[in-house]
Structure formats: structure tokens, C-alpha cells
Image (spheres, rainbow, N blue to C red):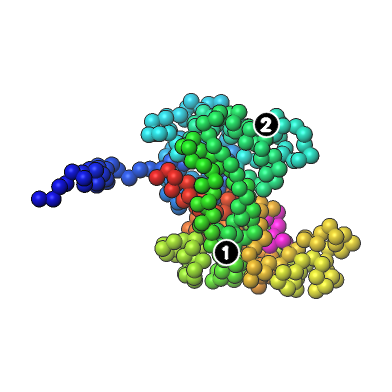
Amino acid sequence: MRDMSSSYPFFLYTFVRFCSKIMTPNKTYTLIDLFAGCGGLSLGMEQAGFTSIFFNEIMPVFASTYLYNRNIPNGHYFIGDINELNANIQEYQHIWENLSGGVDIVCGGPPCQGFSMANRQRVIDDPRNNLYKAYLQFLSVVRPKFFVMENVKGMANKIDEIKENFKEYLGEEYKCDFRLLKAQDFGVPQNRERLILIGNRMGVEPKDIFDSIEKKKREPFVLKDALEGLPHLEARKQKNQGDLEELATGLTERDFEYVENDFYRFINGGRRISKLYNHKNRYNNERDIEIYRRLPQGANSLHPSIADIMPYSKRNDIFKDKYFKLDETQICKTITSHMKFDCNMYIHPWEARGLSPREAARIQTFPDDYVISGAQNQWYAQVGNAVPVKLAEAIGRSILEFLK
């Protein structure tokens, strides 16, 4: 008979693994999102495998979009200033205090206005960075396993000081570091570079997390991929009629059959979407429409084709980017909330109009059934402020590898 004693550890290991699979329910990896906006960062994390259990956002219309696209229980969010949330944090601790091991991850991108290299004042003491300090305060109370802070790349100028700020609030238990990540390196058809700071109290080296993120790089899609197959829109010529719903200039919602190309599958997965949301054009005057029509792709305000009708011609050096026609063969320039004012810097490559909010959302890699709430100019603001979904997913998938 075969001697089984040397194999005993293997059989025991196999038995324990088997029992854990049949007796333990699937683990829920929990996420709290601060400065949540319309939910781009959360959505990418959710696509990676996290579940949002609480969020904070000061703008009601942004929060409305967040809630519309999720099943968040009533009371599992705070719409208002994060400082007020911190002052009343005990009212919400029941949401996460009984979680095994605590909250898995807290994410957020606090606005930080006072971190210029020319500013000699400490970041933490600058009154303009009140929200940044509030983010640290929240972390110090909740103490998640991981945290992610997303911000503009200029924050790297103060990164050593910022690390010290985190240590002041969180102690030596957390390891944290940063990297500048380009959204286009993760398939996003857009030139967007952001500072991502990741910390954890699990003993994981941040470098290992960022190395995992780097392995998820892929070739970017180009603008044509994101715009292909969406219906033609005409410029709206009536002022102050943002509520106008017509096929020619666009509808808030309509039935639609998409071109199911690689980009469609990239942002929607294996799901089939049968509705088109937020695909409406805005008002443009006749001069702007003519400028849009004349400009070739990749050209700006200095192009000779519009010299005779270009406003501000005596200040071309200042307003050279007042108009810019996007190039379908390239990635898009950075989508920003400025689009809520006009889309002159985001002229559609083959139509005489600016990008629609849906097109901007696609460039930010939101899925096609993610509905943006509020007025049309607020659609642009929400999409422009968001973290590209597929960049967030790559970050979330890498962190989840270490949590598992």
C-alpha cells in the first residue's frame, strides 16, 4: 500500500480549499467614493469588481447622475460639503463599521488650488486646500485597507510634502506612493495625464501595485472609433432652447442600433445597448457654424480658411485655440468641464458642430447606457470632470489582485 503520510499536507490543503469554496459566500469588496462627481472613478472600480457602499458629492445634479445609474440604498450617501460630512461622521459609521477587515478602498480627487511650486506655504496649511485636508481627515477616521487619490499632474511638484501630510494624518501604518498615468495608455481615446497616489495598510509595496497597472496597458483607440456610427446632428440655431427635443438637433433619449465595433465592445462589454442617451447638439451662431464647416481636421484659429471671419483676429496669439477641429485619426484632446460654456475647441471632425455630451462621454469611456442627469450644459460639466472609466478600471483591477 502507498504511504500517504508525505502527501497529507497536500490533501489537507485541497480539503480546506474545497470547504472554503462551498461554505464561504463570494467576498464583497467595498468602495467609498469622495468628491464622486457623476461616478466615473467609481464605475471603473465597479467594473473591476468593487461595490460602492457610500459616496459623497457636493453638487446635487452630479449626485443625481451617480444615483440614477446605481442601486445605492437610501442614506448611503451624503450630498454636501465633505467638511460637514466629517463633522457628522458618526451618523454614517454603521454603514462600514461591521465590515470584516474594514472598508477595502476609499477613492477621491479633492480639488487642490494651492500647491504651486511658487507657493512657499505648506500644502496642508493653505486655506485653498481645505478639501484636501478634509479628505485626509476622512481617511484617518475610516482607515481603509487601500486609498486612491486622483489629481492633476501638477501635484507632483509637491509630492514629498503631500506624502508627509498623509503620514501626519495616518501614521506609519500606511505605505503610499504616486505615479503619473496617461489615460491613452489604457485604451482611452484621449490625451489625459493624471497623478494617481495609492496607499495601503496591508504591507503591499506601492511599486508592486503600479507595476501591475503598467501591465494592463493597451493601444489607445482613436477619435473615429469613439464617434463611428452615432447619428448625424445639426447645430441648434435657436437660443435658450436647451429643452428642445427634435431628431435633427438631438434627443435626450431615443431607440438606437449601434455599430458594434471594437470600441463599442470595449466600453460596453458583452452587453447590447438599444438606447441612445444625451446625444444633443447645442446652440451655435451662424459665424461659428461657418467656422466649423471651413476648418480642416487638426486646424485651429490661425488657419487661413477662416481668416476673413475669425473674431479676435488682432489677438490671434492669445486666441489661437479659440477654435480647434478634432482629427479623427488621433486621440482627442483632454475633455474638460469647459465644454459646458462652448465646444469651439472640440469641433466634430466631419460635422459642422461641437461634440455632443454622449460623444464626450464615449471619449471618457462611459458605457452607452450610462445616463447623465440635469440640464444639457451640466451634462458637459459632469463628463468633463470625470475620471476616464477604463483608466479607473485598470487601477481597480490591480488593487483587487492584492486584496484577493
Q: Measuring from the top left, give residue 234's x and y in whole percent.
A: 64, 69
Identity of the residue drawn at 68% across and 43% down: 155
Please state which amino acid type lies under the numbered disc 1.
Answer: Pro
Identity of the residue drawn at 69% across and 60% down: 343
**Left or right, residue 341 beside residue 105:** right
Identity of the residue drawn at 72% across and 39% down: 115
400 relative to 220, above or below: above
Q: Measuring from the top left, give residue 288's x and y in whole percent.
A: 75, 66
Which stretch is magenta? 339-346
Residue at the disc numbered 1: 220
Quick one: label 2, few (<14), some, or many (20+) residues within 10 Å?
Answer: many
Please state which amino acid type lies under the numbered disc 2.
Answer: Ile
Dividing the picture into quadrants, the one containing residue 380 is bottom right
First reached walking from the N terminus: tag 1 or tag 2: 2
Dividing the picture into quadrants, the one containing residue 349 is bottom right
Q: Can residue 208 be seen from the camera position used here?
A: yes
Residue 124 circle label = 2
281 relative to 30, above or below: below
Q: How many marks?
A: 2
